Image: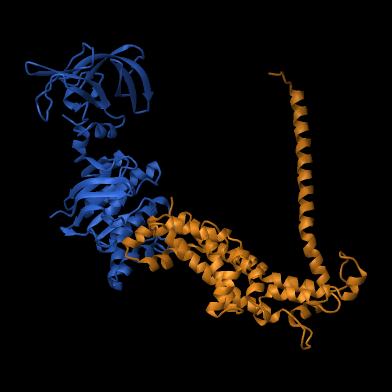
Chain colours: A orange, B blue
């Protein structure tokens, strides 16, 4: 052991104070750099969408727009009003809504049911069923494009919103089941036993007892599924074209099919419009994303 | 008529045998405790009585009616769980009447039952609260209330107190005892806590490895354990089991350890079968609380033992002595002063001993 006097402790104290201060400032510096890096593309998008083509040609990427000019947003949403060749987002936006709402609903509901059965009504071989479902999470979507196209053809729903709903529901189930299974595993099975003694059946237990306490995981699943389905381009571009296309496909067509000058402002506005619904879902659903709704209710 | 009768019941999970040839009977109004270490099959047995688990072999009768294949809700039972299992999304009122509503009982009858039970359990002020807004004790009370409103033939309790803290557990234990005294219902109660079992049960069935080791009154379980498992399981610290041999000469039986000259006379012992006792290898069982510092009655056996270890726990102290190189524990009031590493004069109360066959580990 070293002999330390009062003054040497004082020195050590000073030293550790300076080291901590330096590290703290360094941390903030790195965080600010990262934040700028992530915000930069969004800034460029928003700024560009508010500029006129004139301004874009004259200024740089970062120049502030001369005023709030929403013309390009209107063009992106509703078109210029002349006939052929005018692609705009409005009809495809509704296509996407018509696709995403039922697909999210069905995949979430089926996932909840499957998770319920896999945890609370165990049967022989349930582990295998779960394992095979998990495979679904890892299968690359490209691998199933052809068989799926054939299936949709046989069912007579290729190139339709219904076809896309089916595809997204089926490929959502592995994920939604995984979410709900992991959630229901943590709910004591005694709850189900108590309900069975009270005389509730399979569906009653699900709807009356488990579903009302599943809000956190329902919200998580909805956010996940909505984002996946809304942002999907592969299935949309493969299984639909023309009027049945979802918004991401239309966005692609719009940006690529410009005949004359590249209208960066309209492109940027379109891209933002296509991204807004997922943002809204995050903001709205995030509020209800309260964990531990069941905590305390079942344990002491 | 037996309220509950279980015949030759066996249960396996795959290749694991959980229950083996269980036979049990309960009379109306009795309080049966299933006691055993974790994994002994006691909870499985309770779930089978409730109808939540299927049976591989054997039968369950409630009121002489074979319910082996009857749905839980139709068995006229109610169950209280360790985690209370209150429905989190429903308030206390909805929790308590859920079963009655399922059974399509009339509204007036439901209200009447709810009022009666909630007053009785003093939860009538909590009816509009959610389970998450209740304390542990209140939740337990509501869980019991949910069972009570159904007026079942048999109450099943699955370790209902083990989620509570020590103080509350003692309180709730008393309440359950009072409840049983007032209502005189038939109860099957699962626990791993021997104090709970002893204080609550009119009968205790001690289980180990899926077999009932002894099914008897608390007094007999404590005083006359039927094998070494029961002797070891009940009591804290558990019964001293000293290995040695019996000697029989001219109708006098005595016990001695190998190569020892200390002979303990076995006089008033109630042998199951008084033959072939000479040279039998046995465990001599004596509880720590039956070893005294002062002579308590004429029959006491006086012995000098060396004290090796002292554990002070407030109201008493547990001393470890060396008996021919075997540990013997004794319990004394903490006021008694005993020196370590010195020989101390002790008195064994021979009216309270148990003897077990060393091979079969059964009481002889």
Task: Find residue A118 and report its horizontal and vertical position in percent.
Answer: 44, 59
Residue B300 or A235: which is nearer the viewer? A235
**Image side of residue B6 versus residue A148, left or right:** left
Task: Find residue B44 and report its horizontal and vertical position in percent.
Answer: 31, 49
**Image side of residue B327 versus residue B135, left or right:** left
Q: Quadrant of the C terminus of chain B?
A: top left
Q: Residue at x 31, y 29 (%)?
A: B237
Residue B298 or B354: which is nearer the viewer? B354
Task: Find residue B165 and report its horizontal and vertical position in percent.
Answer: 40, 43
Q: Is there any visible trace of residue A42 in the rendered image?
A: yes
Q: Residue at x 77, y 64 (%)?
A: A42
Task: Find residue A43 and report its horizontal and vertical position in percent.
Answer: 80, 64
Above/below status of A251 relative to A121: below
Above/below status of A251 relative to B2: below
**Image side of residue B296 versus residue A250, left or right:** left
Above/below status of A278 relative to A240: above
Q: Is there any visible trace of residue B132 in the rendered image?
A: no
Q: Residue at x 30, y 67 (%)?
A: B100
């Amino acid at each position: 052991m070293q002999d330390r006097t009062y003054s040497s402790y004082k020195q050590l104290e000073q030293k550790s104070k300076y080291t901590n201060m330096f590290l703290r400032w360094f941390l903030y510096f790195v965080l600010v750099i990262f934040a700028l890096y992530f915000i930069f593309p969004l800034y460029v998008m928003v700024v560009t969408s508010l500029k006129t083509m004139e301004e874009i040609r004259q200024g740089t990427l970062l120049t502030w727009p001369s005023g709030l000019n929403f013309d390009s947003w209107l063009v992106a949403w509703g078109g210029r009003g002349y006939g052929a060749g005018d692609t705009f987002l409005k009809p495809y936006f509704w296509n996407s809504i018509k696709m995403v709402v039922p697909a999210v609903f069905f995949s979430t509901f089926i996932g909840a049911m499957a998770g319920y059965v896999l945890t609370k009504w165990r049967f022989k071989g349930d582990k295998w069923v779960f394992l095979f479902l998990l495979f679904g999470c890892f299968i690359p979507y490209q691998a199933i494009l052809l068989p799926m196209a054939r299936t949709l053809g046989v069912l007579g729903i290729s190139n339709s919103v219904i076809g896309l709903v089916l595809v997204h529901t089926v490929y959502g189930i592995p994920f939604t089941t995984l979410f709900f299974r992991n959630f229901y595993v943590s709910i004591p099975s005694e709850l189900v036993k108590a309900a069975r003694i009270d005389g509730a059946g399979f569906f009653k237990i699900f709807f009356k007892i488990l579903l009302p306490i599943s809000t956190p995981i329902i919200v998580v699943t909805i956010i996940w599924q909505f984002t996946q389905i809304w942002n999907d381009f592969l299935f949309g571009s493969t299984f639909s074209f023309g009027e049945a296309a979802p918004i991401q496909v239309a966005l692609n067509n719009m940006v690529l099919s410009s005949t004359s000058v590249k209208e960066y402002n309209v492109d940027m506005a379109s891209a933002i419009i296509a991204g807004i619904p997922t943002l809204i879902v995050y903001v709205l659903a995030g509020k209800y994303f309260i964990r531990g709704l069941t905590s305390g209710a079942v344990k002491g | 008529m037996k309220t509950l009768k279980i015949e030759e019941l066996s249960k396996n999970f795959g290749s694991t045998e959980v229950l083996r040839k269980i036979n049990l009977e309960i009379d109306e109004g009795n309080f049966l405790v299933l006691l055993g270490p974790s994994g002994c099959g006691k909870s499985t047995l309770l779930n089978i009585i409730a109808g939540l688990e299927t049976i591989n072999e054997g039968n369950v009768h409630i009121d002489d009616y074979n319910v082996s294949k009857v749905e839980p809700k139709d068995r006229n039972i109610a169950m209280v769980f360790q985690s209370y299992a209150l429905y989190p999304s429903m308030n206390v009122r909805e929790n308590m009447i859920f079963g009655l509503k399922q059974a399509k009982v009339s509204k007036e009858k439901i209200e009447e039952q709810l009022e009666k039970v909630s007053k009785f359990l003093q939860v009538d002020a909590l009816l509009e609260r959610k389970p998450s807004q209740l304390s542990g004790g209140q939740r337990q009370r509501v869980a019991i209330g949910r069972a009570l409103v159904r007026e079942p033939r048999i109450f099943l309790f699955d370790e209902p107190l083990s989620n509570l803290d020590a103080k509350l557990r003692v309180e709730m234990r008393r309440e359950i005892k009072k409840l049983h005294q007032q209502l005189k219902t038939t109860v099957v109660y699962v626990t791993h806590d021997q104090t709970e079992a002893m204080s609550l049960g009119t009968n205790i069935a001690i289980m180990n490895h899926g077999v009932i080791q002894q099914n008897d009154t608390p007094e007999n379980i404590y005083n006359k354990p039927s094998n070494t498992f029961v002797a070891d399981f009940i009591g804290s610290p558990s019964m001293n089991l000293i290995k040695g041999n019996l000697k029989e000469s001219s109708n006098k039986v005595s016990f001695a350890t190998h190569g020892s000259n200390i002979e303990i006379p076995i006089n008033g012992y109630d042998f199951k079968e008084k033959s072939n006792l000479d040279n039998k290898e046995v465990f001599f069982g004596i509880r720590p609380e039956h070893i005294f510092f002062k002579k308590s009655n004429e029959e006491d056996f006086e012995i000098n033992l060396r004290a090796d270890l002292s554990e002070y726990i407030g109201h008493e102290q547990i001393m470890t002595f060396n008996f021919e190189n075997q540990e013997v524990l004794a319990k004394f009031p903490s006021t008694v002063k005993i020196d370590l590493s010195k020989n101390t004069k002790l008195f064994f109360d021979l009216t309270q001993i148990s003897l077990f066959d060393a091979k079969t580990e059964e009481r002889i």
